[in-house]
Image: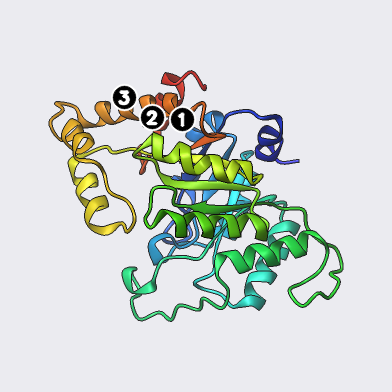
Amino acid sequence: MSKLRDALERGDFVVTGEVAPPHGTDMSAMLASVDRLAPYCHAINVTDNQGATLHLSSLAASRAVLDAGSEPIFQQTCRDRNRLALQSDLLAAWTLGLENVLIVTGDDPRGGDHPRAKGVFDLDSTQLLEVARGMNGGVNMNGAALDGGCNFLLGAAAFPEAEPADIQLERALQKVEAGAQFFQTQAVMDVDVFAERAAVLREAGAKVIAGVLLLKSARVIKFINERLAGLMVPEHLAKRIGESMSPLDEAVELAIEQVAALRDVADGVHIMPLGADDALVRIVEGSGLG
């Protein structure tokens, strides 16, 4: 059983991190990050062409993380593959020993480094969750029996602070109905709003792992506010980081405060350090989770 599944079923407050596969075949930098993060995380997301930019496949990189002795969360986007390829990759993932899957629809290719790429979107994330749940039960999308099934822990993304709230919540509940067992959320900026909406998902039976994004500089905050749909850093937080003599240290302190506030309203935190691996370690240790 995966450590992540085991911890969530025990009711532990979990910590997950994130790495990106390389833009090429040299995985040394990624694996160095994994070595740094793994002692502080129950599992580590391995992103799948994040931001619609070319990287080594999450499938190969996830297996490399597993071979290195750490637990990956294989990430699969619907953007780049049709239903045949998506199912084939899920079967491959299981045979490679990957037990955790995060299923997302994926960003528009026009925003990535291959803007002329055709987005497939044969299935959306909710539909693929339902397919994966069927594969856990031993059948493919058409209901035909598989020669050996799967038993994935199925995850999905949620956007608890995005508006309109009722539509966002309804979409998340549809994912629960389709098979999502846990959520990793977009970065939390307002814990009270998060708590209200996460409670609905937890009551529906899903675990909710709250996103904590390291706001490590004014430049990062500007990028978030201008480029990331559905996420806005509040003015008081932007001012706090922007006026600090040490923005990175201030961002770590802010993240520690956020983790403390989330302890009673979430099932864990998904810390996104934006490449500052040591900051994740400081956040976990500063929060007493190490």
Residue ID for mark 2: 258
- Disc 1 or 3, which lies upstream in sequence? 3
Q: Is residue 124 left or right of residue 250?
A: right
**Are discs 1 and 2 less than 8 Å apart at CB?**
yes
Q: Position of residue 276 (x, y in %)?
A: 35, 37
State which quarter of the image contains the N terminus. Answer: top right
Q: Amino acid at mark 2?
A: Gln
| Real-space Cα separation, disc 3 to disc 2, in angstroms | 9 Å
**Are discs 3 and 2 less than 8 Å apart at CB?**
no
Q: Amino acid at mark 3?
A: Glu
The tag on residue 253 is: 3
Q: Is residue 283 left or right of residue 176?
A: left
Q: Is residue 189 left or right of residue 154?
A: left
- Disc 3 or 2, which lies upstream in sequence? 3
Q: Amino acid at mark 1?
A: Leu
User: Quick one: label 1, few (<14), some, or many (20+) residues within 10 Å?
Assistant: many
Residue ID for mark 1: 262
